[in-house]
Image: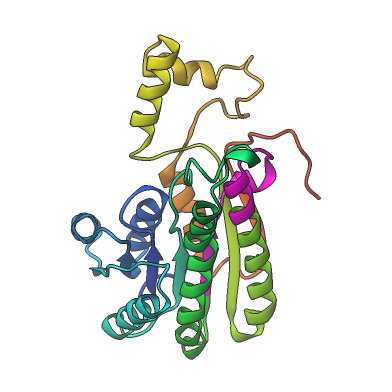
Amino acid sequence: MDLGLASKRGLVVGGSRGIGKAIALELAREGVDLAISARNEQELERTAQEISTATGQRVLPIPCDVTDRDRVEAAVGSAARQLGGLQILINSGSRPGGSPTATGRIDTIVDEDFLDDFNVKYMGALRCARAAIPHLKASGWGRIVNISGLNARVAGNMSGGARNASLVHQTRTLAMQLGRDGITVNCIHPGATRTERTAVVLEARAEDAGLSPAEVEARDYASDNPRSNSIGRMVDAAEIGLLAVFLCSDKSWAINGEVIAADGGGSRAVYY
């Protein structure tokens, strides 16, 4: 299927690793020239070179701190100038897992850390969207995809629930504001997803449990484990990338302001 993405230009925020990197790679495979941004300049340059070599597409590394409005606007402006326009924005910037002093019981919450998590995820996405929207409008065609998280639907993680649920609201609000400008805005809720961090996380859990990392993963996705998902394995970041690419495509006009859970069917809840 031709997704209509060849010659489009995009910016992937949080594109140096993890889900953001996987999305950038899949977009480049569809012919999108890209800028990727994150705080670590060396990691950005390595990832940009890796994706460009693999796909033949132009991939620009543009460092950016999403907590700083001036830097965000400068980074988005630089991406649009160097690429010759901008039609796609992926908001995947976050601190994975959030601050330990912002995610637990209420009596352990440190206000400044909680607000910092929110500032990166929610306000970071808002700043990036605000800076990118004029360029998308100028193109007459645009896609914004926000990468949120299933903590929005699961009570327990104070910071994760707040920032991810708020990003859903932002998604729907922008979709209502921008649809008639030819811009759709959607949101993906990843669940547990295999990225570069997965091996480290599994090793730590395996040490605590006295098992191997492979045994821990097999236990987590066993058919008799009520916390497993319906496909019996962890979702890979590349699969989130493929979903994001479809939402960015010219075939996805009917989907606007929506949230898609991408966790391999990990919940028995019915959303209607």
Residue 262 is situated, as x and y percent measured from the top left of the image, at: 57, 45
Whether residue 256 is visible here, answered yes or no, is no
Magenta highlight on residue 133 = no
Rendered residue at 45%/58% (across/down): 92
Query: Farthest residue toward the right?
Result: 272
Count the numbered circles shown.
0
Q: Is residue 264 left or right of residue 43?
A: right
**Magenta residues, as a range?**
143-163
Work out whether 2 lies above or below 237: below
Q: Nearer the viewer, residue 173 or 260?
A: 173
**Residue found at x 33% / y 76%:** 75
Q: Quadrant of residue 103?
A: top right
Quarter holding residue 151: top right
Percent across and percent down for residue 261 are 62, 47
At x 67%, y 80%, the residue is 177
Instruction: Tell which of 121 and 177 is nearer to you.
Output: 121
- Seen in the image, is 153 located left or right of residue 184? right
Q: Is residue 148 magenta?
A: yes
Q: Percent from the top left, x then y, of residue 116?
A: 48, 58
Q: Is residue 227 left or right of residue 38?
A: right
- 25 to the left or right of 222: left
Colour mode? rainbow
Residue 94, position as x, y percentages in the image:
45, 55
| Residue drawn at 27 percent across, 67 percent down | 63
